[in-house]
Image (spheres, helix red, strand yellow):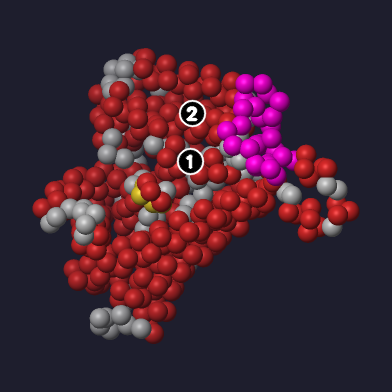
Amino acid sequence: MIQLSYLDYSAQEGKSWLHRRAPKAKVIGVVLVLLAVVTMRSLPILFFLYAFLVVLFFLSRVPVKIFPLAFYPLLFAVFFILISGFQLYFILLIFLKVLCGSTSVVLLLSTTPYPSIFRVLGKVLPSLFVTALFLTYRSIFILLEVFEETQQALYLRGGLQWRHPWRSLINISNAFGHLLIKGMDASEKMYESMILRGFENKIHYRGD
Amino acid sequence: MSHIHFPDGILPPWLWISGFVVAILVWAILLRFIKKEELSRRLPLLGMMAAVMVLGASVEIVPIAYHVNLTVISGILLGPSLIFLATFVVNVILALFGHGGITVIGLNTLTLSIEGILGYFFFRLFHKMVKRLSITTFSATFLALLFSTLSMIGVVSLGTSHYEDLIHQGEGHGLFEFKLFKEKDDHQEINQTRPREEGPEKADKTRPREANLKRFIAVVLPLGFIGWILEGIITALMVKYIHRLRPDLLGLEGKSA
């Protein structure tokens, strides 16, 4: 998740042909990929779809350090090896479905500024839901900033030490608690500034 | 553990479509209980708590394949109505990054909300009975996680026959027929060679779907147990920390130990 700030940077500063495409077209593209992921059961087709997305990723000159972000869901897909009876076909099918979905979304987020994405979503989804989604996405960036400060404070208090598990647990919990309190302070400030700008359960994007 | 990590296309359509329908219905009902001003005032807090949940869920404790959900603490702070919308948003963001499928969002929202809503009510109930914040929070978190994990297992077991079709779909496809680990009762054929006349008990014993699901449960519950204790302790310490600095956020009456 730390790489999210790079995603935003790449989306804002990138100049490739994919960056210049209309956000609407890219959102539709991702929806089509996700539809294929939901409905396809053919391994070769999913493999070609993934290869196409990887080629697109490198053609759009997105920083390479963002690429591993698309692999992170594999950590959670490992459980399916247990269900599958260790069938390689099933395992590959799951891994490719996961990779196609995550790569397409990472590609969208790294080539399109997120207010543009939410503007497109706001036209088809309930405004309350899109506002909540927007605020959550924005809050992740705020929390990541606080997290960096908290990390330093955590290390200064001894950080994580396997020899002292209880101490480590207290440190982690205090760090999370600190993150929460700071986050809530930030959310209160955010709300006050939103009210000053005329917020009424709906965020208006530039160009609306 | 209660978060369903199934990618798309694994659960049968009737199951995930029902998940979406029920989730949207519950959301529509819960929205009626929140005042417009209250919703508007708490939306930024909802966004922040959802962000905390996303960050918590993205840190996996690798040895036990567990990630904290922080749904209980979010439920305690947001209340039962808003936690539902928060878990919906969290699941959408996680699903977009491949952490659980898009089609599983509805079911994940339901199982995670069970965690948040039960956590909220257990916390209030235990606090009235015990008054000790650490014990109250730990017990509320542990029980809420136990119930939501059981509901997750229930959901997973509903789609067993569908997984079997998928697993056996690869058989006879040459290159992909390779099997890393073969078990005596892993094939459907065994089911066919032992007809139903032998009685339901014997036929059940040979069903591969049950063997696989049992294996899944046998892994999930013990690992989950370690995770629930860990998350219970973390949540209890966090609540204690919040109580020290901002007791107003917990909305508790009277002093706690």
Residue B40 in view of the camera: no
Residue A89 left/right relative to A194: right
Q: Which residue is drawn at 74% across and 49% down?
A: B206
Q: Decide which of A26, B60 is in the foreground and name it.
A: B60
Q: Mark 1 points at which residue?
A: A78
Q: Which of marks 2 and 1 is nearer the N terminus?
A: 1
Q: What are the residue bounds of the magenta stretch?
A: B163-188
Q: Do the residues labelled 2 and 1 touch (CB within 8 Å)?
A: no
Percent across and percent down for residue A27 are 45, 29
- Mark 2 residue element: helix
Image location (x, y in percent) of residue B213: 62, 51
Q: Which residue is located at x 54 percent, y 40 percent?
A: A81
Residue at the extreme right of the image, as rendered: B197
Q: Is residue A8 above or below residue B207?
A: above
Q: Mark 2, residues whose alpha carbon is within 10 Å: few (<14), some, or many (≥20)? A: many
Query: Which disc is residue A100 wearing?
Result: 2
Front one among B225 and B125: B225
Picture coordinates of residue B202, whole percent (x, y): 79, 55
Amino acid type, label 2: Cys
Side of B168 relative to B181 (left or right): right
In the image, what residue occupies the spot 22% across and 67% down? Answer: B241
Residue placed farthest to the front in the image? B184
